[in-house]
Image (cartoon, grey):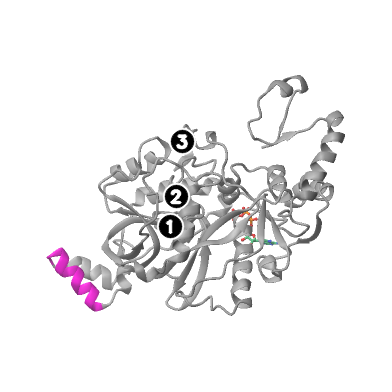
Amino acid sequence: AVREEEEENSSRRRDDGSWKKIKEREGKDCRQAFTEQLAANTSRPKHLLVYINPYGGKRQGKRIYEQKVAPLFAEAGISTDVIVTEYANHARDHLRTEADVVCVGGDGMFSEIIHGLIWRTQIDGSVDPNCPDETLLPCSLRIGIIPAGSTDCICFATVGTNDPVTSALHIIVGDSQPMDVCSVHHNNTFLRYSVSLLGYGFYGDVLTDSERKRWMGPARYDFSGLKMFLTHHYYEGTVSYLPARGIIGTPRDTTRCRSGCVVCQHNGQLLSERSESDDEWRTIRGKFLAINAASMSCACPRSPKGLSPAAHLADGTTDLILVRKCSRFNFLRHLLRHTSKDDQFDMTFVEVHRVRRFRFTPRHCQSDSELELDLQESGKRQIFSQICRDHPACGCAPAYSSWNCDGEILTHTAIDVRAHCQLIKLFARGIEEQAVFEDLTNPCAI
Ligand SMILES: Nc1ncnc2c1ncn2[C@@H]1O[C@H](COP(=O)(O)OP(=O)(O)OP(=O)(O)O)[C@@H](O)[C@H]1O
């Protein structure tokens, strides 16, 4: 965040790399030096297409942009076309691939914009976005996020703070942070793109339940979280995945993805040269409380460690986390570890794999031969579970959950997910400050 310093202290203090606000008297010289530096910087944008969601978060998007951001763009000589959206998907449908884009809003608005940008890039490049096997074309334009939503996790994960002025300065100096995107398909139909979390079971159920309780405001997430924890539903199905081979880094690393991350640079290069057919599919059948795929740590002020603390923004992979059926007590232990220094993956019923692609088929969609195989594997024919599968409405447990895709509910449960390495670029540098993740005292983290 931008810090205003006392003049006499600031001259003595060591430069810690954070943004500082300059006092009026020194301002004139510095402004000239800043303008000269900006003129010499060729990667900075000259023109921007700005989309403002006036209804995001506390409905402050327009005010934040006009008061805090627009004056800085004008000072830096950046021209803008500003569109205040009039309806959901206005920005997605309006987007053209001619100018870098600024999104003023929350994660939902960012998602809308990347859908417009990625889709248009594929259509312009004659790539079929409905085909899950197509290698998608990277988007050449950069996206800046001015946080003005109720959830601003993507901004937090890529800039390290949710501060509109800091984000505006990253845009002005032309920073660039590549980012992976997962495509989600059902058979040969495109469903959605995801940049943070895909969650089936626990996180899908929490979202579905909380959507019915919008009237409760942000408290609905805590309420639905507690309710779904007590309900303790598990779901049967088959997960197949392509492990990311030859890469450096694992989901159990203690190092984190930071500004200038060498893991992202190395793996990004490696995976863009290697084809998926070099890897072998693996299959796991079972009963799961949660199946999560984290394409970034998913850390945010509410959850400082995130779902997969060592996940990377731009290494071409996603961390597939499988939480098998276990007791409520053990599941609680697993959830609580997201708030402590203990490893949440170091439990017998949890496994985590760094993957390039995965598929999920819920049990009620499996073919008869797959079901027969399941029965042979379990070694016994349980008449009641057979009745439950055939008649999921019998009330003992729902047969399937929903996928939570970056906060949106997907319409299908059988999905094919593929990580596309460095598909988009943001006006950001990644997280620079270590301290942001070290506050594990927040009990709301689950
Ligand atoms: N003018 C508009 N009217 C209604 N909805 C809009 C408008 N502009 C954008 N939207 C939609 O509003 C949704 C939420 O936007 P945004 O992310 O900015 O706010 P938010 O408060 O953080 O919401 P959420 O937490 O649900 O993501 C987005 O999915 C976007 O498509």
Estimate how packed mark 1 is, as few (under 14), some (14 to 19) or many (20 or more) residues with alpha carbons within 10 Å. many
Q: Does 337 appear in magenta?
A: no
Residue holding disc 1: 318
Residue holding disc 2: 311
Element carrying mark 2? loop
Q: Is residue 371 left or right of residue 76?
A: left
Residue 110 x, y percent position in the rendering: 62, 58
What is the CA distance from the residue labelled 3 to the residue labelled 1?
Answer: 26 Å
Instruction: Name the main secondary structure of what is drawn in magenta.
Output: helix
What is the CA distance from the residue labelled 2 to the residue labelled 3?
Answer: 22 Å
Query: Mark 2 and mark 1 in contact (Cβ < 8 Å)?
Result: yes
Which stretch appears magenta? 368-380
Residue 305 x, y percent position in the rendering: 46, 41
> Can residue 154 be seen?
yes
Residue holding disc 3: 443
First in residue order: circle 2 vs circle 3 = 2
Residue 193 vertical position relative to residue 443 in the rendered view, above or below = below
Residue 98 vertical position relative to residue 26 in the rendered view, above or below = below
Location of the N terminus by quadrant is top right
Residue at the image point whose x is 23% and y is 70% from the top? 387
